[in-house]
Amino acid sequence: MTKPIPSPEILAFGEAMTLFIADAPGAMAEVEHFQRRIAGADTNVAIGLARLGFRVGWLSRVGDDSFGTYIRRTLEAEGLDCRHLVADPEHPTGLVFKERAEGGTDPRVEYFRRGSAASHLSPADAVQVDFTAARHLHATGIPPAISASCRELAWHMLEQARTAGASISFDPNLRPSLWASEEDMRETLNAMAAHADWVLPGLGEGRRLTGLETPHDIAGFYLDRGAKAVILKLGPEGSYYRGTLGGQEQSFTVPGFEVAEVVDTVGAGDGFAVGVVSALLDGLSPRAAVRRGNLIGAQAVQVVGDMEGLPSRARLTELEAVLPSLDD
């Protein structure tokens, strides 16, 4: 008799898209050849955690088309549990095209996702999810921006995970062009962040969402609303932590890692999330978690593609073995 596959210990959801990256630098209109990969902030984190040995479940929709088949095969090859990935016969898989970055600048990206299969996600897609088996839920601010039904799903996932006692991480991942208004974006994402244990904004995102300037004050905004820890990404300078993990409130900055050449900055924040979330789930200290976030984020910017720089557990062990000890 076939042994049943255990339910995922980590849950993630959102939109995975088929990504086409330009083979050569230059304006998109001039590019003739592209490499096919996959993209999506939520999938980047899910893949990164799966590469570190966690059992990660992916909930989403793709089109019942060749691009959807490609995404499913790619995610399954990365070790993701795709039992909650639906092939939608009525709506297509989302596509995204990206220029080849030069000199460490952010590459131009063009999306073709309006009316995609993932935009039709709703709480009905989560009926079969076993939240009682989940240790952790990772959520971002992208699904609630895609559509009203996606926003309902995001709330459902947060509430069910909280009821089941799972820890929750939340990365705002601002996509202002997807929102009806700035006010709607701020109110929705701040409310969702209040349902999370670990909030992971960039400094610019935190300033835009809270109206506050300093990392200390931005972190305090979310701590006052129920978060246990807030970790702000400061770019090459590293990251800032303020929180109560371990019982007593503490705050500190952990410097970033020097990188010889920045190839592509897309996905760096997702790599950071992989580092922080994995370390906290591994039982490491907040300072060690923030340093791992910086470390994996630095790996992510050194390669072409959104998730190609995310390390395996063996590679992460090698990278961390040469780091100096931390004074926790």
Image (cartoon, helix red, strand yellow):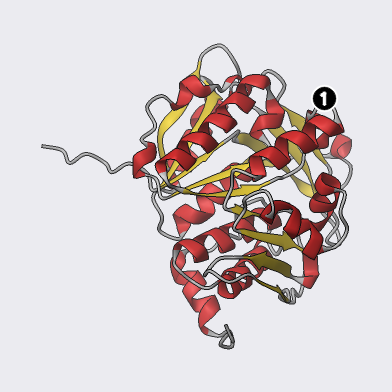
Q: Secondary structure at mark 1?
A: loop
- Graded by Cα atoms within 10 Å as few (under 14), some (14 to 19) or many (20 or more), the crowding at tag 1 reads few
Relative to 78, residue 316 above or below: below
- Residue 73 is situated, as x and y percent measured from the top left of the image, at 45, 37
State the quadrant of the N terminus.
Answer: top left
**Does 312 sit left or right of 105 as displayed?**
left
**Does 207 sit left or right of 268 as displayed?**
right
* Residue named by callout 1: 180
Identity of the residue drawn at 61% across and 60% down: 309
Amino acid on which the number 1 mark rests in the picture: Ala
**Does 182 sit left or right of 275 as displayed?**
right
Identity of the residue drawn at 68% across and 36% down: 142
Report if residue 256 is visible in the image.
Answer: yes
State the quadrant of the C terminus.
Answer: bottom right
Relative to 44, residue 128 above or below: above
Q: Residue furthest left?
A: 1
Q: Residue furthest top?
A: 90
Depth check: give the residue in front, 105 or 162: 162
- Residue 79 is situated, as x and y percent measured from the top left of the image, at 41, 48
Report if residue 93 is visible in the image.
Answer: no
- Residue 229 is situated, as x and y percent measured from the top left of the image, at 62, 60
Depth check: give the residue in front, 221 or 127: 221
- Residue 218 is situated, as x and y percent measured from the top left of the image, at 78, 57
- Determine which quarter of the picture holds residue 303: bottom right
Depth check: give the residue in front, 265 or 224: 224
